[in-house]
Amino acid sequence: MTTEATTSAELWRDPHAAAADRVRDLMARMTLPEKIAQLQGIWVGIDSAGEMAPHQHDLIVEPPDFDELTRHGIGQLTRVFGTRPIAPEVGAHSLARSQRQIIASTRFGIPAMVHEECLTGLAAWQATAFPSPLCWGASFEPDLVRRMTSLIGGSMRRLGVHQGLAPVLDVARDLRWGRVEETIAEDPHLVGTIGAAYVAGLESAGIVATLKHFAGYSASRGGRNLAPVSIGPRELADVLLPPFEMALHAGARSVMNSYTDNDGVPVAADPAMLTDLLRDGYGFTGTVVADYFAVPFLYRLHAVATDREDAAAQALAAGIDVELPTVDCYGDPLLTAVQEGRVDEALVDRALTRVLAQKCELGLLDPDFSPEPDNGAAGIDLDDADSRAVARQLAERSIVLLRNEGVLPLTSRRRVAVVGPRANDPGAMLGCYSFPLHVGKHHPEVPMGIDVPTVLDALGDDHDVVHAAGCTVFGGTDADLRAAVEAAAGAEVCVAVLGDEAGLFGGGSSGEGCDASDLRLPGRQEELLEALIATGTPVVLVLLSGRPYELSRQIDRLAAAVCGFYPGEEGAAALAAVLSGRVNPSGRLPVSFPGAGATQPSTYLTAPLGARSDVSTVDPTPLFPFGHGLTYAPVTWVSVTADAAEWPTDGTCRVVTTLRNDTELPTTEVVQLYLHDPVAEVARPVQALVGAVKVDLEPGETRTVTAVVHADQTSYTGRAGRRQVDPGAVELRVGRSSGDIDTAIGLTMTGPRREVGFDRVFTPTFDLN
């Protein structure tokens, strides 16, 4: 390194100086190539990686030498652990070597930030596979999600990773969309509450949380991945943006753009979204990173840019600070455009300021920074007892009992036929962003790295079981079906384990790029279920899937139905505990189950014209509504009251709910509060969740839940395009689900109309006694 870069007078190296001053000092010393290098990512091994991003292999060029790529420095290293199976210790030492190489061979010695996927746990070999986001939503337990992500963040820190590409805050809008499994719920309040908890846990470990995908992605036309988005500004503001606002309040330091275009404008090239709203409106000061290949997509897919240079210019002007996953448009094309005056260097400086400020926060500019892993990486356990315990608890608390005609729980030992394509496959427990399915499937010669029991394994400990698959997820033979029917006919109970195979880009029935044309069970699974029911043996359906399916033709003939979504590595044990009665089911549906009509994609969050009517022959009424879930020990609702009939437009309303457990079992209720606005300036949802809390009750116990709801939570985007709180009549509906309301409380909002913004109150406070 030169003397100029190492003199002790350099303010940027002083950890006691203000971050803004350090960044200005460093930038003043940097050349243009050094500046632009900090806006780039590098994905080493991308040429040999499996298909992990859309059009990944269409966009791969022959990778240059690592030294050449990093000779001016580098902003980020992409997926050091999440590209191929690598032992944690080996990966940590390899990463340290790369960082030492970058530090030693560049003029300023600025280390790279390192990012990884971490949606269902760190996407690394041998790391815990936690339950999927739909399970987080089904749990209705933000504190448990926060515990999970603090553990995930701790693992990342030990390995030298700085940034996690999660959580996904897209609100499920069309249940045919393949990425529904990555969403938390179809309700923005639940998505925001759980998503904010995820962020708080990850950030508490010092990891930069990245909010995905800002914004509109889940509203793609026809439920097709990467399809156009044609929503109006009100749906964007009132349904899709609130989870991002809540997560930003929780401390998220990075945002990733949506791939899609909103009304014709790709988000990656939209300054109204990435600068005017995110920066000026929300006051966000962190980094905006491109979703993988989103910058070249501007000319390759969206056709709004002529070439790489134009794509770089538009993305940089819109507000994308770092191009991921690897250098392309933000390389020589951007450098040339700035040097020749077609792109203002001030835009480079704007992005660089944010990147360097984040590196400063993380200690990467400090003179004592060391890339070496803690304790030399010896004995790194990415699937430790604490992680498995939280994975187990979250799985247990997320399982939803949809229907029960008295056959559950299976408290005594039975002859049980365990059938179905998901019964004896560890992958049935995992979503598409789990390491074994995201990366491991491309390396079949390598062990999974973690122990993931199957439902057959777990039920075999409790019962005398016989197994027959019956079919595969996508097909199967008549002989396979006959074998399953024979097994069921000879059993006391049949447990049919059906659902999805998670995958990517056509490699599964659910997951990124695996959209559904309808909501019938994939392949021959419905045929199998009909054949099992016809045996006369009581059939318990266990659904392990990435989306809800249309079960209306069979549901009334099932003895019971249980939904686990993708409950993670401890999911089978959790399911066995619920089926046996060792655990009382307490999950509630984060997404509605559609009624008759397998192509109905709608969610509960609909205006009056979206409900059943006499002017359409299509009935959108769900089979199981949002928030639904049964228990083996129903709770007695004693009373629901409000403290006053009037609610100031700038004040709060107190709602008190008293619950009692009159059974002999410990049990759980989820108290759900919905807002109904009888008359508003625009058509509003018939009802929308404004708060929920999970309440455990011991046998004979009575508990009181006090919810304090702020008037801000009644706000909506009016005709003028601004969020407002109106005076007039409203109704708070309190109940067990959106379809099972115990009490509707009529209230009058008093006072003037108020405008509220990003600093509004998003959630009620709950007091449990």
Image (cartoon, rainbow, N blue to C red):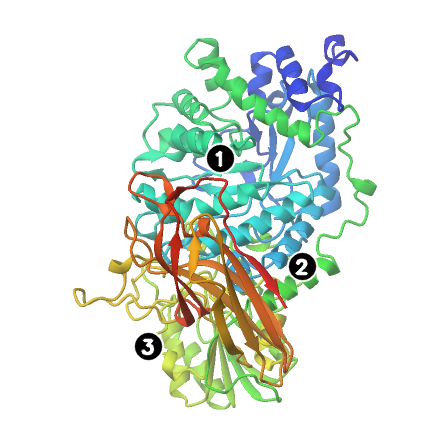
Query: Residue 686 location, x and y as percent?
Result: 33, 60
Indicate whether 239 appears above or below 330.
Answer: below
Q: Is residue 223 visible?
A: yes
> Residue at horizontal 53%, vertical 67%?
656
Q: Secondary structure at mark 3?
A: loop
Instruction: Say which element carries label 1.
Output: loop
Report how far apart the C-alphas of labels 3 and 2 lie in the structure.
38 Å
The tag on residue 282 is 1
When the figure is inspected, residue 332 is found, relative to residue 249, above or below; the finding is above
User: Of circles 1 and 2, which is in front?
Assistant: 1
Q: Amino acid at mark 1?
A: Tyr
- Residue neighbourhood size for the residue with mark 3, other residues' Cα within 10 Å, grouped as few (<14), some (14–19), many (≥20): few
Say which label, 3 or 1, has the lower sequence index: 1
Residue identified by numbered label 2: 450
Q: CA distance from mark 3 to mark 1?
A: 47 Å
Q: Quadrant of the C terminus?
A: bottom right
- Residue found at the far left of this picture: 615
Q: Which of the 4 quarters of the picture holds residue 478?
A: bottom left
If you read the primary sequence from the N terminus, does the residue marked by circle 1 or circle 2 appear first? 1
- Where is the N terminus found, in terms of image quarters? top right
Q: What x and y, as percent, mark residue 198?
A: 59, 50
**Is label 2 in a helix, a strand or a loop?**
loop
Residue 67 location, x and y as percent? Answer: 65, 22
**Marked residue nearer the N-terminal end (3 or 2):** 2
Q: CA distance from mark 1 to mark 2?
A: 41 Å
Q: Which residue is mark 3?
A: 553
* Amino acid at the residue labelled 2: Ile
Residue 478 seen in the current view: no
